[in-house]
Structure formats: C-alpha cells, structure tokens
Image (cartoon, helix red, strand yellow):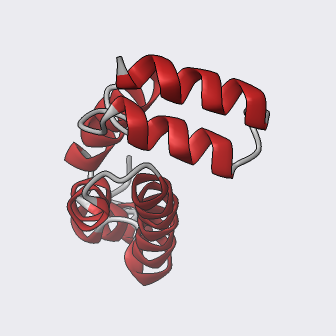
Amino acid sequence: MDGYVDLGAMHQMIWGPGWIGTGIFWIFQLVIGYFVYRDAKERGMSSALWFILAIIPVIGWLFLAIYVIIRETGQSGDRGKSAGVILDERYARGELSTEDYRQMKEELGK
C-alpha cells in the first residue's frame, strides 16, 4: 500500500448508510407499523401500543415476531366476549341461518 486511504469506505464506516439509507429504513419500519396497527385494530387489540413496539428499530422486529405469534395462536379477538355476543356477531355476519341461531340461542339460555 502506498499510503492510499479510501475516504468513501471510511465515511461509510463512520456515518453509516447516509440519509437515503436511513430514510428507506424508517419508511420500511413505518409501513410495517401501519400494517400491524391496522391488523391489531381489526382484532380488538391495543393498536397504538403494537404500532409503537413495531417501529422501534431492531427490537421492533422482535415485537413484530411476538405479535405474529399471538395473532396466529388466536389469543385475542373473541377472548373476553360472552357466548351470546359471539353468537349475535356470527348471525349478523351471515355465518348462521336463522334456525341455527335460534336453536343455539335457546341452548345458551338453559
């Protein structure tokens, strides 16, 4: 080596990816946070909390994995609702016929 120092590589090591890279990273984090927020809101979970946890750099990826696990195991949503409320919602969505709804409602009343 004849004393040549690659200032571009040194700049990259000291300052990181620069404004463009940082901007792309944050846009990516915010997009993920937005989708987590929307999904959590649909499922009746604390959407603002999950949004904040999902956009935290690096650690947010861990919270994102936790959110997906909770979401896929179904530990939210209908939890805390009475059987009658769930039955009413299913009937309102058209998942049950009137006859099935009345029969199930009668059985719940016993």
**Which residue is found at the position 71% from the left and 24% from the top?**
100
Picture quadrant where residue 61 is located: top left
In the image shown, does 84 or 79 lie closer to the viewer?
A: 84
In the image shown, does 27 or 15 lie closer to the viewer?
A: 27
The answer to whether residue 74 is visible is: no
In the image shown, does 110 or 14 lie closer to the viewer?
A: 110
Q: Position of residue 3 (x, y in %)?
A: 31, 59
Above or below, comparing residue 63 to residue 46 in the picture: above
Tell me: 77 left or right of 14: right
Tell me: 30 left or right of 52: right
Above or below, comparing residue 73 to residue 62 in the picture: above
Q: Furthest-bottom residue in view?
A: 19
Q: Position of residue 101 (x, y in %)?
A: 65, 32
**Which residue is found at the position 76% from the left and 29% from the top?**
99
The answer to whether residue 46 is visible is: yes
Quadrant of the drawing holding the C terminus: top left
Q: Position of residue 17 (x, y in %)?
A: 41, 67
**Which residue is found at the position 31% from the left and 62% from the top?**
47
Tell me: 77 left or right of 63: right
Picture quadrant where residue 10 is located: bottom left
Above or below, comparing residue 43 to residue 13 in the picture: above
Above or below, comparing residue 54 to residue 8 in the picture: above
Count numbered badges in the picture.
Answer: 0
Q: Position of residue 60 (x, y in %)?
A: 26, 49
